[in-house]
Image (spheres, rainbow, N blue to C red):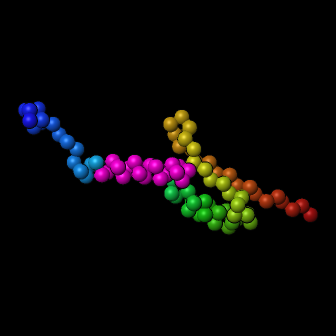
Amino acid sequence: MGLLALFRRTPSSASVAKERLRIIVAQERSARGGGPDYLPLLRRELLEVIRKYVNVDPEAIQVSLEREDGHEVLELSVALPERKTG
């Protein structure tokens, strides 16, 4: 064993486990489409608020999260029903 081997630091098992967990979580997210976990809840809550004012179909709300130029962009699209004239 050389003198330099005494001063070489090996990563702790906790830091190795933490890095492995981060890799697993990133892989799971990418397998599910890469979106954050809160998007379904956000969509549901937005639908509840919009329904207080307008009767919309639950499928009328689309929420997506995209990356553009290093920023995350939350896009919300709501298809409102046509007004009845008469």
Residue 73 quadrant: top right
Q: Is residue 15 visible?
A: yes
Q: Residue furthest right?
A: 86
Above or below residue 69? Residue 38 is: below
Check the picture and name the quadrant holding the N terminus.
top left
What is the chief secondary structure element of the magenta stretch? helix
Check the picture and name the quadrant holding the C terminus.
bottom right
Q: Residue furthest front?
A: 1
Q: Residue at x 75, y 57 (%)?
A: 80
Percent across and percent down for residue 18 are: 31, 51
Above or below residue 8? Residue 58 is: below
Horizontal side of residue 40 vs 51, given as left or right: left
Work out whether residue 10 or residue 83 is closer to the camera in this orientation and state it.
10
Whether residue 6 is in magenta: the answer is: no
Percent across and percent down for residue 22 are: 38, 49
Horizontal side of residue 75 vs 32, given as left or right: right
Region in magenta = 17-35
**How many numbered discs, if any?**
0
Work out whether residue 47 or residue 65 is closer to the camera in this orientation and state it.
65
Work out whether residue 74 or residue 25 is closer to the camera in this orientation and state it.
25
Percent across and percent down for residue 60 are: 71, 58
Percent across and percent down for residue 26 are: 44, 49
Whether residue 28 is in magenta: the answer is: yes
Horizontal side of residue 10 vs 66, given as left or right: left
Q: Residue at x 36, y 52 (%)?
A: 21
Q: Residue at x 66, y 54 (%)?
A: 62
Q: Is residue 35 visible?
A: no
